[in-house]
Image (cartoon, rainbow, N blue to C red):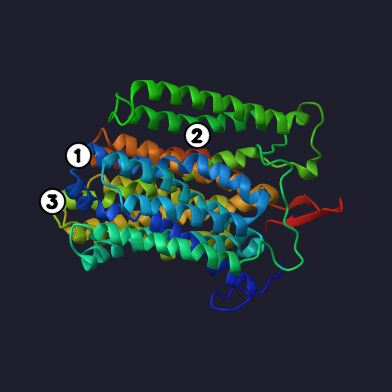
Amino acid sequence: MTKQSFNLFSLTPKMKILHFSWIAFFISFLVWFNHAPLLGMIAQELGLTPAQIKTLLILNVALTIPARILIGMLTDKYGPRKAYSLLLLVCSIPCFMFATADSFEQLALARFLLGFIGAGFVIGVRLVSDWFPANQLGTAEGIYGGWGNFGSAAAAISMPILALFFGGDDGWRYAIGVTGIICFVYSFIFYWGVRDTPQGATYFKPKSAKAMEVTSVKDFYLLLLMKVPLFGALALLNWKLSPNGVSLISANVSYIIYIVLAALFIYEVYNAWDVNKSIFTTPVEPIHQYEFKQVAVLNVLYFATFGSELAVVSMLPLFFFETFDLSMVTAGLLASSYAFMNLASRPLGGWISDKYGRKKTLMILTVGLTAGYAVMATIDGQWPLVLAVVAAMSCSFFVQAGEGAVFAAVPLIKRRLTGQIAGMTGAYGNVGAVCYLTILSFVSYSTFFWVIAASAFLGFLILFLMSEPKGTIAEVMPDGTVELISVE
């Protein structure tokens, strides 16, 4: 792999890959959050209740939990080029479904299916990690994630304007339809323009795509423990949609879903055992070992960082609309300031991690986002609007820089498992979003922000268990020889 200087505007192959990747991720987020700034228009036309609106917000992030796990496995097995191209192509369909929906049930189904497009992030993490050396990886992943995440801000800015441009009651439909067309077309552009690895490099694949490999008995049980919140979040969503929540599904359907989730969890446990049973009889050679606790710590941090970003991006237009009595267009534009910080803050978080260390950077940024959400919890209608926007942008800096720092560390754990690790860590971000948005449906905005601040502080405490990545990762070449990949 080349170790050229990091010149973002060069035409080197690795920079072309970086640009292809962040644009794909940008489109993913544009489509994923194309509804958020239009909810006021949609609710008015279709007569949606506040409870139904909040349900759409939860559904939008629900399917991404299993999707990121699945996409991570498929990416490691088949490569990012095929995985991302197919994801964009397929997900354009529910985007068109949402644009043509005439009832809450149709909107809900389309939003649920569109949650799958949020898994695209995982694919780019693996692709970028195979093209950049460790000393540039945090910066590259930060640019990929930050510029891609800006798709949500672009949606907040552009969708109301597009809807007004098309005009009429169906303006929002045409605006959302445009994003579906963009998604469909770029799937082919990505397929034609991308390679999985640099010329002559090896694409390392896991021994099995059924479950993540671990290298000790202790880590096996920790892996099982970390699977519980993933299924717990889906069970929480099921409860929210049942007669105990918004009654979108019947009690009988809810019970069936609980049974299916329990069966899937048992199946996941079996797959984990089947892939890792050898560690109970034959210890893994030290050179091939990695600490799964590294993954667990990053999972918790991404729960607090990306989980809160997804939740806040979804509700912030309504927060500004209701708190300061603004128009939906103005509220959407102001709310975009939160996601706008992605352009600089996430790459900066990755760059700082490259330069000063992964653990130290994460600790500082986690303290900052704890304080940021504590400040946002105090915002009310008495605040000057300018200060409220500044507070949101300041909080956003720490949140998104923290995300960049998390994924500066993810690819340095075990190269051939990068897709699966990114999938699990990314899924925890969606678990956080489901939990936070569910809490929001029961509490005030202020309490919602306080809950996020408390969970971020818990992440700070857990960070003391993390070890700074050092030395090399050992991977086995197709001919049986061992290649050592530097993580410093």
Give the residue displayed 73% in from the left and 68% down from the top.
199
Q: Of tags 3 and 1, which is closer to the observer?
A: 1
In this orientation, which residue lies closer to the viewer: 448 or 267?
267
Measured in 3D between alpha carbons, the distance from the residue under mark 2 to the one under mark 3, in whole angstroms, is 39 Å
SS category of the residue bearing label 1: loop
Pointer 2: what residue? 230
Q: Position of residue 223 (x, y in %)?
A: 61, 33
Mark nearer the N terminus (3 vs 1): 1
- Seen in the picture, residue 379 relative to 356 is either above or below; the reply is above
The numbered disc on residue 382 is 3
Three-letter amino acid code at the position of disc 2 = Leu
- Seen in the picture, residue 291 relative to 172 is either above or below; the reply is above
SS category of the residue bearing label 2: helix
Residues at circles 3 and 1 in contact by the CB criterion of under 8 Å = no
Q: Position of residue 360 (x, y in %)?
A: 54, 52
Q: Position of residue 1 (x, y in %)?
A: 72, 67
In this orientation, which residue lies closer to the viewer: 414 or 180?
180
Q: Position of residue 421 (x, y in %)?
A: 60, 45
Asked if one can make out residue 352 in the rendered structure from this viewpoint, the answer is no
- Seen in the picture, residue 7 relative to 213 is either above or below; the reply is below
Three-letter amino acid code at the position of disc 3 = Gln
Pointer 1: what residue? 49
How many residues crowd around disc 1 within 10 Å: few (fewer than 14), some, or many (20 or more)? few
Asked if one can make out residue 33 in the rendered structure from this viewpoint, the answer is yes
